[in-house]
Image: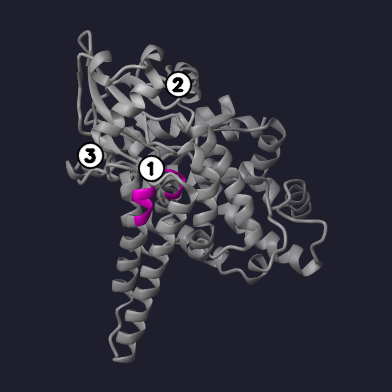
Amino acid sequence: MKEQDRIPTSRLERTGNFLKTGAKVGGNYLKHYSKKLLGTDNTEELQRENAEDIYDALSKLKGSALKVAQMMSMDEGVLPRAYTEKFAQAQYSAPPLSYPLVVKTFKSQLGSSPSELFDSFSKNAVAAASIGQVHRAGKDGKKLAVKVQYPGVASSISSDLKIVRPIVGTMLNISTSEMNHYLQEVEERLMEETDYKLELERSVIISKACETIEGLEFPTYYPEYSAERILTMDWLQGQHLSEFLKSEPSQEIRDKIGQVLWEFYDFQIHELRQVHADPHPGNFLFREDGTIGVIDFGCIKEFRKDFYDHYFQLMIPEVTNNDQAFESLLFELDFLLKADSPEEVAHFKKVYFEVHHLLAQPFFVDEFDFSDTHYFARIYALSEVYQNDKMLRKAKAARGPRDAIYLNRTYFGLYSLLHKLGARIQTKSRVRRVLEH
């Protein structure tokens, strides 16, 4: 893959790059409608061209703009397949930076070049994502992975999110109020994600707390070779999910890996009340023996006790089936608003009942088969209904607590991973034990 010698860092240059892409997309639409007049149905071609043009622009900008594309790639069934497939490249195979830029980052952050700090250091990145890229290194016989952040990423977060706001709003078909609500939360998480010192601290704490979960492996981190924009850890063995699945692992191994993932997230959410909130395939390494390496703790979401206590009550059938109790909780969590008309209350109660009832299904059975295509078809169908909801589109205020944004993304990301694995899970969830006693 071709390396980049520079990244646009000024707001003017980054905006200009994106405006050029907007013009390309507009040109694609003109070609599409010209062909349509001639009786040629080329919708798939249009989507593919637009996805390629948008991804090409975002991958050159790196940072928040590309991170949003990566996040949207996890929402299968929401965006057209051409977008999810293309945007998924941001998880670990974006165009990398050239070595001179890596050296420049090392000198500014650690005062020395990679060759001065390590016994060996790969000049070419072995993986590149939205915020940084990974190099292989060696020191005193240890194999290391060194994550290097792209220049200008942290300083351009706010302006980047303003750039992508109209594109995201159009793709996800959500109101301005919902978009502002969503992007405020995304901006806070991204600011944390660009602080590698914070990531190192959280990585040590959470990996230590989860070390008793059998089947997980966490790297050791090295503060002496880390800084705000550089993070050094042990090199872990394993494959990304797509490569792993090509080896056609047995159902037993799929189930074993799925169970490990379930236990990992179940423990974080219901015991630690904080979670590795970016469960995309690029953050895990899968192995033939059914174990998993966890390699990225950049995005962590902590939950307030009052939010946790109220939100997970929505998952209990006895509560959701009690109309008065359910409505009261929805008001507590701002899913229903005091200004809502009786018609709006009735409408949104129905919407949220369907959403939470569907999301909670795995919690209240002893075993759940995540290969069930019917279940995921219902999730995708409900997402489409939710996005096209006229009342929600006209809303003048955002609904629901911001804490729910990353929690829901975490669960949908986890469910998506388990679905791709085709895993059958023993889902005796802690949420059931915590809330029913």
Residue 61 in magenta stretch: yes
Q: Which mark is residue 130?
A: 1
Extent of the magenta region: 57-65
Q: CA distance from mark 3 to mark 1?
A: 22 Å
Q: Earlier in the sequence, mark 3 or mark 1?
A: 1
* Quarter occupied by residue 351: bottom right
Q: Amino acid at mark 1?
A: Ser
> Closer to the observer: label 3 or label 1?
1
Q: Position of residue 269 (x, y in %)?
A: 55, 32
Name the residue carrying label 2: 200
Q: Amino acid at mark 2?
A: Leu
Q: Is the Cβ of the residue at disc 3 closer than 8 Å to that at disc 1?
A: no
Residue 210 in magenta stretch: no
Q: Secondary structure at mark 2?
A: helix
Secondary structure, magenta segment, majority class: helix
Name the residue carrying label 3: 244
